[in-house]
Amino acid sequence: MNTVCAISTAPGTGGIAVLRVSGPDAIALTDRIFRGRHTLSDTPAGTVRYGEILSGSEILDQVLCSVFRAPHSFTGEDTVEIACHGSRYIQQAILRALIDAGCAQAAPGEFTQRAFLNGKLDLTEAEAVADLIAAQSKAEKDLALAHLKGGVSTELHALREQLLTLTSLLELELDFADHEELEFADRSELSALTDTIHNRLTTLIDSFRLGNAVKNGVPVAIVGPVNAGKSTLLNALLGEERAIVSDIPGTTRDAIEDCLTIHGLQFRFIDTAGLRETADAVETIGIRRSYAAADRAEVILYVRDIADSTAHEPKVLDWQKHGKTVLFVLNKADLVPASHWPRTTDTTVILSAKYDSLEPLKEAIYRAAGIRADEHALATTISSARHYEALVRGREAILRVQQGLHDQLSGELLALDLHDCLDAIGEITGEITNDEVLGNIFSKFCIGK
């Protein structure tokens, strides 16, 4: 591989910036532009050197250079990290000096891709690096760290080892096909093990609901009649004037979406057009979108005026039948004496979006999501659609093995389906992959990582 370089800190001006150089000639090429009491080539691994970066005879900056030697670096290659002052000019000038010295500009995600290719990370851990950089909530950060520590990888490698053992025994029988009485893979044990593998794959597949919610946020639709205070409630939850508030019915014509973190978990709130019969063509489109937003949501806040006893939405029962949690928010409680408030249930919250603390509502929303995002739950939770699709294919292959055992198929046919399951799991960890998949994954990384 050639030696590459890039700015690894975020674009812009800051107190410091870091440039990374990695490859077989990383130390020697950096030495061409570095001047200090000691050369980097004579520097022990894990040592930081103070010095100057030069462009010809011009001093570009005073820097600290950290030296890492293969294989004990992030990429598994010789690596130098240059910490300089955070001026954009200085960053670009040092980058140009490195390229002039013989380095190539790194592509997006190239450092992490090299770590994967050099066996420092498997593919799930490499993807976790990008997820950690993009994390916007505590739960999302915890999930990415759990993947980076190898929680999912360990589980998948264990499954793969079991599958390899089964496949090896079945294929060993093929080597002794002339002796039909020989059976190296006991069929009852094989059946029990495939049941275990099927159940574990199902658990991982089911965990995608949690992983997807953590990674993309739990969708919460705010629906209800016109003038119930839905936009006021959204603004109060977010702490800013995000939606237009007006006494004129039908002000909200389209869905407005924004995010809020509750107990480290991100929720995506969607304010929708008020539900009512109308001849207005544009408002009708907005109402149709309101129903669509509710259909996609995990939690539905059905907001109505506490004084409006006639407000009823027939679709509520349908939403509940389809497993959605509906919280009934009785708003404008400041306009009605407490003695006239209706009886409440566990799914009812009475409040004034204008004046009350919304902490009880936030707690109710968090409970309604039913998501336990603790460290133990996240350790073996998948969050990638790519992983989900591969696991589904793996489970389908195991189901074919189970059916084949029931039908007493030959070991040769069973081995083919076991190989399909092995391939599906191998695609997740990167033991089986291709350049197109790798290009798609690493192209989404930022340059410098």
Image: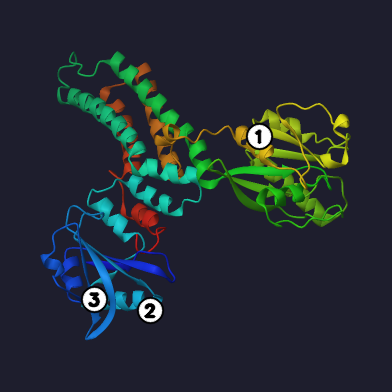
Residue 364 screen position, x and y as percent: 66, 34
Q: Earlier in the sequence, mark 1 or mark 3?
A: 3
Label 1: which secondary element: helix
Q: Residue at x 73, y 56 (%)?
A: 243
Q: Nearer the viewer, residue 338 or 205?
A: 338
Secondary-structure class at tag 2: helix
Q: What quarter of the picture does the C terminus occupy?
A: bottom left
Q: Which residue is mark 2?
A: 89
Label 3 neighbour load within 10 Å: few <14, some 14-19, many 20+? some
Q: Nearer the viewer, mark 1 or mark 3?
A: 3
Vertical placement of residue 62 versus 185, above or below: below
Residue wearing tag 3:
52
* Tag 2: amino acid: Tyr
Sequence-earlier tag: 2 or 1: 2
| Mark 3 residue type | Glu
Quarter of the image for residue 105 reads bottom left
Q: Residue at x 65, y 52 (%)?
A: 257
Circle 1 Cα neighbour tier, 10 Å, few/some/many (<14 / 14–19 / ≥20): some
Q: Earlier in the sequence, mark 3 or mark 2?
A: 3
Q: Which mark is residue 364?
A: 1
Marks 3 and 2, Cα distance to the nearest angstrom?
A: 16 Å
Q: Point out the residue furthest to the left here.
A: 42
